[in-house]
Amino acid sequence: MKAVQLSPTGAVISIGSVKLDYTALLDPDLERKPVRAGKWLVSPGGKAANQAVAAARAGARVRLIGSIGDDDAGRKLLAFLRDNWIDIEQVRLNQGQPTGSSVVLVTPDGENSILRFPGATALLKPSAIQQMEIREQDIIMTHLGPPPGSGDCSASRCPCSWSNLNPERNDHSSSRATATWAGQHSGRQ
């Protein structure tokens, strides 16, 4: 595998989910019904958005391709992404659709269960990828691989580097790896 160098004109392009996460840190007494949460957190989430923010905070130029609802949650997410220097031109706002969300239940020992509601994320279409301007210097991060039906993503269509991040990791190591990579290859140390 050859080493990838991101030129100053290259970008990290993150494709996938942009959601709002609701996290409940559960009380230690899980036997008591109803189970209670000691803390409730609401935060920006979605694999693509999380990776985009990690890369941008490490100094990379980042474009995000996703789909959100035209609702309060969607507008808050767009503001958060803008505040983190993410190019959101290709984040589609969907009228009449709710923004996707996840409910994360975290036990005192750190185990979690996640309930996902895709919402407008499910409306992300292969045409969003097919219409992208892709340069050799770009790095594309997908989450679960290129979306089904996204067409020919071979080297002739995508002269850039692809990174498929492991969607089953719960320890945020892929975010740390992205941040480390972006910091090393951004030209801004």
Image (tube, rainbow, N blue to C red):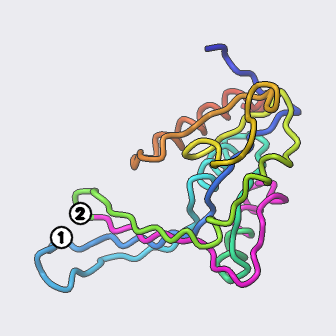
Task: Establish if 108 lies above or below 186.
Answer: below
- Left or right: 173 as drawn, with respect to 72: left
Q: Quadrant of the C terminus?
A: top right
Q: Which residues are magenta?
A: 79-106
Q: Residues within 10 Å of mark 1 (few under 14, many from 20)?
A: some
Task: Establish if 179 lies above or below 52.
Answer: above
Task: Establish if 38 lies above or below 45.
Answer: below
Q: Which residue is mark 2?
A: 108
Q: Position of residue 161 (x, y in %)?
A: 71, 28
- Left or right: 19 as drawn, with respect to 36: right
Residue 88, magenta (yes or no): yes
Query: Observer-nearest residue: 105 or 128?
Result: 128
Residue at 67 percent across and 34 percent down: it is 182
Q: Which residue is mark 1?
A: 28
Q: Position of residue 4 (x, y in %)?
A: 70, 21
Q: Quadrant of the N terminus?
A: top right
Q: Position of residue 68 (x, y in %)?
A: 69, 70
